[in-house]
Amino acid sequence: MTDRKATLSVGDKSIELPVYSGTVGPDVIDVRGLVQEGVFTYDPGFVSTAACESAITYIDGAKGVLLHRGYPIDQLAEQSDYLEVCYLLLNGELPTPEENKRFHDTIKNHTMLHDQMRNFFHGFRRDAHPMAIMCGVVGALSAFYHDQMDTSDPRQREITAHRLIAKMPTIAAWCYKYSIGQPFMYPRNDLDYAENFLHMMFGVPCEDYKPSPTLAKAMDKIFLLHADHEQNASTSTVRLAGSTGANPYACIASGIAALWGPAHGGANEAVLDMLAEIGDEKNIEKFIAKAKDKDDPFRLMGFGHRVYKNFDPRAKVMRETAHEVLAELGLEDDPLLKIAQRLEKIALEDDYFVERKLYPNVDFYSGIILKAIGIPTSMFTVIFALSRTIGWFSHWNEMVSGNYRIGRPRQLYTGEEKRDYPTKK
């Protein structure tokens, strides 16, 4: 941070505002003093507003950079695993081998749900959307652990983090099992995090299920690459809810609700919908032409990114993983996946897409992987929420660990001025 000032002229008044510099990234102008001058800033969507100070994740969209606690996402994806990244996001540093083992063991020992939670699942309609179930179940966790929700106690926050990281795969898998009418599968402590999730998703009591190492590795990559993404809509929702002093389970449930919106967490599902709309390889050229026509409402989903104006650094990792999964399952000839592979080739070679930097993003590849594994599109956002829980909790934990104020956005009022209620005759 520096002692620099910015000057804002409003009418005949000049207002000096402090200018701060972070470790990297754009400078920010501190506008908190404007309220004393009787003016607010106007920033719909908060796209030009830094609502908090954070040391967790940094994104440079122009350069295609994503750092977690300073570590590039591609290095973490290549050398780390999801639980180690969870530890990193939560604690600020990579664990020692001993800390890493202890953390993995702790998570394994918290994967069970309270048995009364089974009754909660059965309270939902059979055809309820898995995200509706997850949102309700996660919020309900506060009813089971209400004796350890003192947000001022670091140890209680740590225990809550462990519980959420550990139980989210169980909750997610049970949402799926309930929706298809199969028995719930309990977690197994002899499996690692991703293997356990696949076991609870696809295992049945009448036979043994052995998760494929390739598929388990792919799931772990999906979890890792979606672990955090700075101050997005759902993370900001968690922070705003947390600023009221709400319990952490309610805050995470609010993040799940925000993620449920198709503009946020539904991108990989939209990719599959697009592939289904194209329907056949012979239709690709027609849909490419539609995508290039600015007057046509059709858009290629999974290409380009709101934040990344160069390339999505997560997509490179997902691309390699997608091809490994397709080869493992022998699905290179699946009609929809063949369309996806053809679109990928066009986007990487066609001048129209290259010039506009419309490269395949992480949602394009993750949608392909999840479909290949056999996960229905209704579960895509559930898996996203499972992955992002650590990011949400880390930001909530960072906020409540320091000095914070209740969030209170302002508005530009455009309604009626004061008027009197008409006198009744």
Image (cartoon, helix red, strand yellow):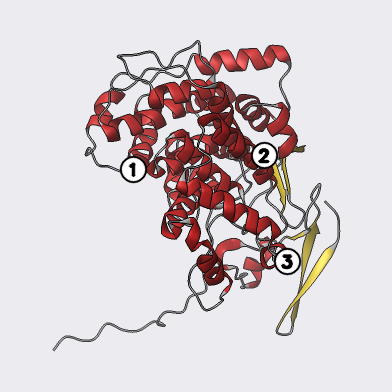
Q: How far apart are marks 1 and 3 (CA)?
A: 40 Å
In front: 249, or 300? Answer: 300
5 relative to 240, above or below: below
**Location of residue 343 (image quadrant):** bottom right
Q: State the residue position of label 1.
A: 132
Q: Do the residues labelled 3 and 2 touch (CB within 8 Å)?
A: no
* Residue 236 at least partly seen: no
Residue 247 horizontal side relative to residue 225, left or right: left
The local secondary structure at tag 3 comes to: helix
The local secondary structure at tag 2 comes to: helix
Q: State the residue position of label 2.
A: 317
Numbered badge on residue 255: none
Residue found at the far bottom of this picture = 425
In front: 392, or 147? Answer: 392
Q: State the residue position of label 3.
A: 355
Residue found at the far right of this picture = 3
Q: Residues within 10 Å of mark 3 (few under 14, many from 20)?
A: few
